[in-house]
Amino acid sequence: MPDARLLPDFAAVRAAAARIAPVLPHTPVMHSHTLDALSGARLFFKCDHLQKTGAFKARGAVNAVLGLSDDQAARGVATHSSGNHGAALAWAARLRGIAAHVVVPANANRAKRANIARYGARIIDCEPTLAAREAALATVLAATGANAVPPYDDARVIAGQGTAALELIEQVGGLDDLVVPVGGGGLLAGSALAARGLDAAIRVYGAEPSGADDAARSFAAGERLLQTDPRTIADGLRTSLGELNFAIIHRDVQDIITVTEAEIVAAMRLFWEVCKQLIEPSSATVLAAVLARPGYFAGRRTGLILSGGNVDLDAPLPWMETPA
Amino acid sequence: MPDARLLPDFAAVRAAAARIAPVLPHTPVMHSHTLDALSGARLFFKCDHLQKTGAFKARGAVNAVLGLSDDQAARGVATHSSGNHGAALAWAARLRGIAAHVVVPANANRAKRANIARYGARIIDCEPTLAAREAALATVLAATGANAVPPYDDARVIAGQGTAALELIEQVGGLDDLVVPVGGGGLLAGSALAARGLDAAIRVYGAEPSGADDAARSFAAGERLLQTDPRTIADGLRTSLGELNFAIIHRDVQDIITVTEAEIVAAMRLFWEVCKQLIEPSSATVLAAVLARPGYFAGRRTGLILSGGNVDLDAPLPWMETPA
């Protein structure tokens, strides 16, 4: 376990909110009578698929990039990312007028890869393993002297991601629960810090694909277990939980709810149809989790964070594919 | 031409806005730096795909249904509709606790047909011709004594549809142009009344598929020409312009801009990707029109009405289909 003094806290989330405010306007909150009736709860959807770059990742990236000194910033930034974090870091770097280098694994979704390039980053391709990603990044860092901005296991990034929950709770008021997708754990850890800081009675849940359930297994075991061979359509949630992230999640989160691929796809389609919002599969895990656990949420005011909307529109819709 | 005294006017649009206000909250307005840069204009999208029932049609239907006397209402309402108007009338009838009978042609999109059923209307199937639709409706009216609420050629419906433009102009302030999809012409005629009433300098354009271009041909000829054999993916825009609608459009609209199927599909995909909003092909005609006529809109503040979001998600995405 990392030293608790290394963990970001609620004050860091507040500071991140102040830092990102000039460039990232608050995203809207949606609700739906149809989905309330279906779930038995009162649902508030935080629309971070409408965030700049199409995902919450802009929050952590902007917080990290704007927190660099001018000397640090002049050397640029670098990361490895399967997509949304890379695009967010590229966007934040362009905002500050500095270089971004992004290591992208070969299995990244095309829409996300295109976003990284669109925002002007240099893309470095690699094999889709954590070892290959880290090796490629080390090479880039050595060659450029750039500042590493990890996708989730980083105090600045966790604090930045926590601003989505901070906004949501302040926009809606009086939430009972918060349901958040969990992959590397930046969004979930940040959300837990925000909820704990604002109202300790809010129950915070992670929503995770059963085909990449390292957070659920780690949570149950009380120690961080890595994800090998993830199998899920939710391409933002395939990575292992980070160290800092696990320490916060283990301390502050109520439970991790796992959902099947069929539940994710059904929830995604339902949300497209009812709310006309193009959310990506990772976002749909939260609605899937609420529908899968009616006993947890009946009659409660539940916030759900929609993490992104970068769907690959060149691929068939998931409910159109012939089952394997 | 109908007697000008039969045409609804700006006061009717204002009255409709007051009548629908308690049940239909204002829909939001979106903008996008990416689409502004691409078009060279400043674009304001009125999100009626987020209207109740997923389309602007709720406005005219609610205005007509709430305007009935109690005696009239007790006999129920009836219409023929390829989809969104039928769903809207069903929704409005349920709101008032009265019966709705909807004649639906066999080629209606499945999502729209499902909405009509979901809101509790009785569905009467018919062949996909105007003659068959009118014959089936006449039979229903004779059997039930219900009040006919036509989809577009009706003063109450036109006035109701005009409330979308009224809201948009008041939400945004200082528009130069308004671009509106045109099928039967309820939305376009109502929008023209609203724009003319609020600010006569606003230029109002219709956006129409070239495969169903009766409005453009009628506008050029100065007389109403009917649509035969429409060929367009924009299933909301296949009908002929109504009589009242043509009279208003001929008097108050600047021009009708036709767009190809390829332009509609490209604009729809672009809007999905950039704005994460699931708009249907009919809605995409307005963005297609603005992108097709940069000379009309460069440097101007242009409002675009997104008419609906009822996409058939069981069909392949239009850009995925093999070209015929």
Image: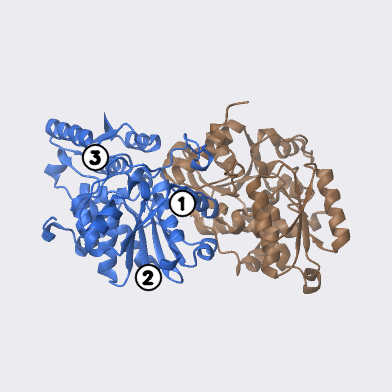
Chain colours: A brown, B blue
Label whose residue precedes the other's in the sequence (2 or 3) = 3
* Mark 1, residue position: B263
Residue nearest the viewer, comparing B216 with A52 = B216
Of the residues shown, which amino acid type is indicated by label 2? Asp
Image location of residue A126, percent across then percent down:
79, 46
Chain letter belonging to callout 1:
B
Q: Disc 2 on helix, strand or loop? A: loop
Label whose residue precedes the other's in the sequence (3 or 1) = 3
Left or right relative to A253: residue A25:
left
Residue nearest the viewer, comparing B259 with A212 = B259
Image location of residue B253, percent across then percent down:
28, 63
Residue nearest the viewer, comparing B201 with A192 = B201
* Mark 2, residue position: B176
Of the residues shown, which amino acid type is indicated by label 3? Gly
The answer to whether residue A11 shows anywhere in this view is no
Disc nearest the viewer among 2 and 3: 2
